[in-house]
Amino acid sequence: SQELEQSPQSLIVQEGKNLTINCTSSKTLYGLYWYKQKYGEGLIFLMMLQKGGEEKSHEKITAKLDEKKQQSSLHITASQPSHAGIYLCGADGSYWGNKLVFGAGTILRVKS
Amino acid sequence: DAGITQSPRHKVTETGTPVTLRCHQTENHRYMYWYRQDPGHGLRLIHYSYGVKDTDKGEVSDGYSVSRSKTEDFLLTLESATSSQTSVYFCAISPWTSGRGETQYFGPGTRLLVL
């Protein structure tokens, strides 16, 4: 969706390094969702954020929601090869009705 | 993991032939969705259903039709497949009990190649 921008498009990091992926909406959000996808597989739900300032963690992955900026950041601490994949953010809101829209995704590669 | 299966998982077909993809859920969720995923486009919604026999279009619905005769099954049909419909198709489900902020859970996907 053009209303949901993800950055960067791709990322290569050395194992053990931290990284951040951003997702910015041009429309008001109800919820912001993070998914992970491995090549050839379906999307795995990571977490959902609804309230401004909310922060959630899933193993070594932490996501925050900045309601004022309509932006979420996903942060991976001490990256591992198992973190490699495509990270997608999704959002719902009154603008989109009862639907999720998705960003184009961020491809993460972790070098050993 | 949410109980969602898709069949077939892989399909090769020829231009002009009809194709039907099936999504089956065991969660009794009200909402079901069909998406396609293409490089550079992320996930785009094709059609969705909010109940048995209740469906609506998404942003890329041209050339696709859907049917939902039972809560657990949501079928996506390509009436006459074209090469532009080569893609990976995902089904998703959601309870959507509150009308906002409901997580969608995805199936494993179907890879479709139209020659």
Image: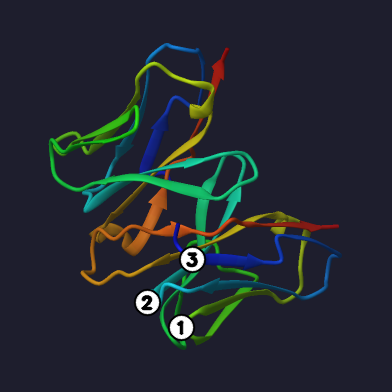
For label 1, the crowd category at 10 Å Cα-Cα, with few meaning under 14, some 14 to 19 and many 20 or more, is many
Query: Which secondary structure, mark 3?
Result: loop
Looking at the rendered image, the disc whose residue lies closer to the viewer, 3 or 2, is 3
Q: What type is the residue that disc 3 sits on?
A: Gly
Mark with earlier residue (3, 2): 3
Q: How many marks?
A: 3
Q: In the image shown, does A2 or A90 lie closer to the viewer?
A: A90
Q: Chain of mark 3?
A: B
User: For mark 3, what is the residue?
Assistant: B3
Q: Chain of mark 2?
A: B
Residue B71 circle label = 1
Confirm whether circles 3 and 2 share one chain.
yes
Mark with earlier residue (2, 1): 2
For label 2, the crowd category at 10 Å Cα-Cα, with few meaning under 14, some 14 to 19 and many 20 or more, is some
Left or right of A111: which side holds A74?
Answer: left
Confirm whether circles 1 and 3 share one chain.
yes
- For the C terminus of chain A, which image quadrant? top right
* Residue at x-position 44% and y-position 61%: B2
Q: Chain of mark 1?
A: B
Marks 3 and 2, how far apart at CA: 14 Å
Is the residue under label 3 in contact with that under label 1 (CB below 8 Å)?
no
Left or right of B14: which side holds A47?
Answer: left
Q: Position of residue A23 (x, y in %)?
A: 34, 35
For label 3, the crowd category at 10 Å Cα-Cα, with few meaning under 14, some 14 to 19 and many 20 or more, is few
* Residue at x-position 25% and y-position 58%: B101
Q: What type is the residue that disc 1 sits on?
A: Thr
Left or right of B12: which side holds A97?
Answer: left
Q: Position of residue A22 (x, y in %)?
A: 34, 29
Residue B30 circle label = 2
Query: Which secondary structure, mark 2?
Result: loop
